[in-house]
Amino acid sequence: MHLQRQGGIYMHLVDVSNSYSRKIQKELAQSSTHFIKIYTLGGTRIVYKKNQQKEELVLSNKVRKVTDEEIDFTLSKLTNLTKQDVDITKARDLVEIIINDSSN
Protein backbone atom coordinates (compact mmCIF):
# COMPACT_ATOMS: atom_id res chain seq x y z
CA MET A 1 0.00 0.00 0.00
CA HIS A 2 1.27 3.46 -0.91
CA LEU A 3 -0.36 6.71 0.20
CA GLN A 4 0.89 10.02 -1.11
CA ARG A 5 -0.48 13.49 -1.60
CA GLN A 6 -0.32 14.30 -5.32
CA GLY A 7 -1.66 17.52 -6.80
CA GLY A 8 -3.91 18.30 -3.85
CA ILE A 9 -5.37 14.80 -3.53
CA TYR A 10 -4.25 11.66 -1.77
CA MET A 11 -3.41 8.71 -3.99
CA HIS A 12 -3.63 5.24 -2.52
CA LEU A 13 -2.11 2.27 -4.38
CA VAL A 14 -3.59 -1.08 -3.29
CA ASP A 15 -2.28 -4.52 -4.32
CA VAL A 16 -5.32 -6.60 -5.34
CA SER A 17 -3.39 -9.44 -7.02
CA ASN A 18 -4.92 -12.06 -4.70
CA SER A 19 -8.36 -11.27 -6.14
CA TYR A 20 -7.05 -12.22 -9.60
CA SER A 21 -4.89 -15.20 -8.61
CA ARG A 22 -6.48 -17.68 -11.04
CA LYS A 23 -6.17 -15.33 -14.01
CA ILE A 24 -2.60 -14.49 -13.04
CA GLN A 25 -1.59 -18.16 -12.71
CA LYS A 26 -3.17 -18.94 -16.09
CA GLU A 27 -1.31 -16.12 -17.84
CA LEU A 28 1.99 -17.00 -16.16
CA ALA A 29 1.61 -20.58 -17.39
CA GLN A 30 0.69 -19.57 -20.96
CA SER A 31 3.11 -16.72 -21.69
CA SER A 32 6.71 -15.60 -21.29
CA THR A 33 5.65 -13.29 -18.47
CA HIS A 34 7.25 -14.24 -15.15
CA PHE A 35 5.76 -11.53 -12.88
CA ILE A 36 2.26 -10.05 -12.67
CA LYS A 37 0.81 -7.74 -10.04
CA ILE A 38 -2.54 -5.95 -10.13
CA TYR A 39 -3.19 -2.74 -8.23
CA THR A 40 -6.01 -0.25 -7.86
CA LEU A 41 -5.59 3.48 -7.59
CA GLY A 42 -9.10 4.66 -6.84
CA GLY A 43 -11.10 3.77 -9.94
CA THR A 44 -7.98 3.10 -12.00
CA ARG A 45 -6.69 -0.45 -12.36
CA ILE A 46 -2.98 -1.05 -12.91
CA VAL A 47 -1.57 -4.29 -14.32
CA TYR A 48 2.20 -4.63 -13.93
CA LYS A 49 3.91 -7.39 -15.95
CA LYS A 50 7.53 -8.38 -16.42
CA ASN A 51 9.28 -10.73 -18.80
CA GLN A 52 12.94 -11.02 -19.76
CA GLN A 53 12.79 -8.34 -22.46
CA LYS A 54 10.60 -5.66 -20.90
CA GLU A 55 8.28 -4.49 -18.17
CA GLU A 56 4.77 -3.29 -18.94
CA LEU A 57 2.31 -1.20 -16.96
CA VAL A 58 -1.27 -0.88 -18.17
CA LEU A 59 -3.48 1.68 -16.46
CA SER A 60 -7.19 1.59 -17.24
CA ASN A 61 -10.28 3.37 -16.02
CA LYS A 62 -13.76 2.52 -17.33
CA VAL A 63 -15.27 5.85 -16.23
CA ARG A 64 -12.75 8.52 -17.17
CA LYS A 65 -9.41 9.25 -18.79
CA VAL A 66 -6.30 8.16 -16.84
CA THR A 67 -4.60 11.32 -15.54
CA ASP A 68 -0.96 12.38 -15.87
CA GLU A 69 -0.81 12.50 -12.07
CA GLU A 70 -1.81 8.81 -11.92
CA ILE A 71 0.86 7.94 -14.48
CA ASP A 72 3.53 9.89 -12.56
CA PHE A 73 2.49 8.37 -9.22
CA THR A 74 2.45 4.82 -10.59
CA LEU A 75 5.86 5.17 -12.23
CA SER A 76 7.29 6.68 -9.06
CA LYS A 77 5.95 4.01 -6.72
CA LEU A 78 6.42 0.90 -8.86
CA THR A 79 9.51 1.64 -10.95
CA ASN A 80 11.32 4.76 -9.68
CA LEU A 81 11.30 6.00 -13.30
CA THR A 82 9.75 9.08 -14.91
CA LYS A 83 7.76 9.55 -18.12
CA GLN A 84 10.98 10.54 -19.90
CA ASP A 85 12.46 7.08 -19.20
CA VAL A 86 9.65 5.00 -20.75
CA ASP A 87 7.47 4.60 -23.86
CA ILE A 88 3.85 5.65 -23.24
CA THR A 89 0.84 4.98 -25.45
CA LYS A 90 -2.43 6.66 -24.48
CA ALA A 91 -5.92 5.71 -25.60
CA ARG A 92 -9.25 7.02 -24.34
CA ASP A 93 -9.50 4.91 -21.17
CA LEU A 94 -6.16 3.08 -21.28
CA VAL A 95 -2.48 3.93 -20.90
CA GLU A 96 0.25 1.45 -21.80
CA ILE A 97 3.76 2.04 -20.47
CA ILE A 98 6.65 -0.02 -21.82
CA ILE A 99 9.94 -0.19 -19.95
CA ASN A 100 12.60 -1.78 -22.11
CA ASP A 101 15.32 -3.72 -20.32
CA SER A 102 17.84 -0.95 -21.00
CA SER A 103 15.69 1.67 -19.18
CA ASN A 104 16.26 0.35 -15.67
Image: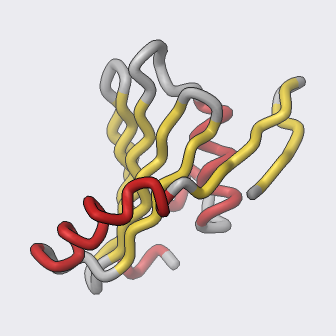
Q: Position of residue 92 (x, y in %)?
A: 34, 19
Q: Position of residue 74 (x, y in %)?
A: 61, 50
Residue toward you, 59 or 21: 21
Outermost residue to the bottom: 52
Quadrant that contains the N terminus: bottom right
Residue 102, picture quadrant: bottom left
Answer above or below: position of 63 versus 24. Answer: above
Give the residue at x 19% y 69%.
Answer: 26
From the viewer's perspective, is 28 left or right of 59? left
From the viewer's perspective, is 101 left or right of 42? left
Residue toward you, 51 or 30: 30
From the viewer's perspective, is 71 left or right of 3? left
Outermost residue to the top: 63
Residue toward you, 18 or 88: 18
Residue 41, picture quadrant: top right
Outermost residue to the left: 30
Identify the image's colour scheme: rainbow, by chain, secondary structure or one colour: secondary structure
Answer above or below: position of 12 versus 82. Answer: above
Q: Position of residue 52 (x, y in %)?
A: 28, 86
Answer above or below: position of 99 versus 96. Answer: below
From the viewer's perspective, is 14 left or right of 61? right
Give the residue at x 89% y 24%.
Answer: 8
Q: Position of residue 44 (x, y in %)?
A: 52, 33
Give the residue at x 69% y 59%.
Answer: 77
Give the residue at x 44% y 26%.
Answer: 61
